[in-house]
Image (tube, helix red, strand yellow):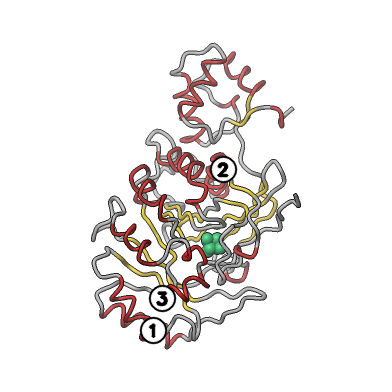
Amino acid sequence: MTSERKNLAGLSRGELAAEVVSMGEKPFRSKQLWHWIYHQGETEFDRMTTLAKSLRMALTENYVVKRPLVSNMQTSEDRTRKWLVEFDDNQQAETVFIPEDDRGAVCISSQVGCTLTCTFCRTGTQKLVRNLTAAEIVGQFMLARDSYNEWPTPNDGGRLISNIVMMGMGEPLLNYENVAKALTIIMDSEGIALSKRRITLSTSGIVPVMQRCGEELGVNLAVSLHAVRNDLRDILVPINRKYPISELLDACRAYPGANNARRITFEYVMLRGVNDSDADARELVRLLQGVPAKFNLIPFNAWEGAPYKCSSNTRMGQFAEILNNGGFSAPIRVPRGRDILAACGQLKSASIRKQR
Ligand code: SF4
């Protein structure tokens, strides 16, 4: 019976209202339902006590509120948690939570696999299987809250799950409609109500969609840069052949809402002998003049078969110093969850693309 009932999680406000009206109810009932689903995190209609009993029964008969299935959960020795989530068609993706002392970010996947084959990224070795739906994207966040028991607002107002980074498997701007719908639900002030300032979307540089993302969602932007020359970036981030560095940086300069108080994060994976020279660092400083930028230097996280090694600590320190002297913040990210392959660039699921 369950599989035939429609899932209400992942519907927009308008879609939820339409379902409620189709049941012969007044549209305002959908506001109450929205509150239960996205503020209280409730999944059982029976417990939605502000709704009339008859409505609760009708909802139970026709609908569900559900999350993706968690088929495996691992917690790292540094407390990073990774879920292997499974969707209705048995496809799988990974979601990661990276806790700090009093806050933390959920790293959410937008696709099963990825089309973009960035050579330092393990996800890139997994061919794109499919885009995730809005319900599957919101569902990853909701199951993270389930896991930490953070529905509704904790009494002391403190939450461990405070931020979202769209940096999991896939390129979010190649699944923009679903990602935008999911983030709009997550930002809605009467539901999960996560501020756009607490959400960062990371792109490898899908230039034509960046402006729209800034205008419509206004979330923080992170850009996977990783190289200062097109010949090298063509290899590390092959989408560069379509949208080269100069076009990417123009799109960054035009990104709505980016300013010195709200800088774009440029991610730069540190690959020994590949992109980590002093000359690379100096060129970065030159290239990013006039862009409200900060850097995130990512020590390369190894995975089986990876063609790179991580730069030495000394090299990374010197690289960071040149960026700092050039006026940019450039922390070296502390790798998290390496022991459970949850660190940056290590995600992959067993889903494989069906043969045509
Ligand atoms: S870095 Fe991002 S865009 Fe590139 S292959 Fe990995 S998941 Fe895809």
Q: On the image, numbered disc 3 is attached to which residue?
A: 229
Q: Secondary structure at mark 2?
A: helix
Asked if residue 292 is positioned above or below residue 29 in the image, the reply reads below
Total labels: the figure holds 3
Which amino acid, by three-letter code, is at mark 2? Gly
Which amino acid, by three-letter code, is at mark 1? Gly
Residue 169, horizontal then vertical, whole percent: 57, 57
Residue 342, horizontal then vertical, whole percent: 58, 64
3D distance between C-alphas at marks 3 and 1: 21 Å
Q: Secondary structure at mark 1?
A: helix
Which residue reaches farthest front? Answer: 242
3D distance between C-alphas at marks 2 and 1: 39 Å
Residue 211 left/right relative to 182 = left
Asked if residue 154 is positioned above or below residue 335 in the image, the reply reads above
Which amino acid, by three-letter code, is at mark 3? Arg
Dividing the picture into quadrants, the one containing residue 275 is bottom left
3D distance between C-alphas at marks 3 and 2: 38 Å
Instruction: Say if mark 3 contacts mark 2, CB within 8 Å.
Output: no
Q: Secondary structure at mark 3?
A: loop
Q: Regarding ligand 1, which quadrant of the image does it lie in? A: bottom right
Q: On the image, numbered disc 1 is attached to which residue?
A: 317
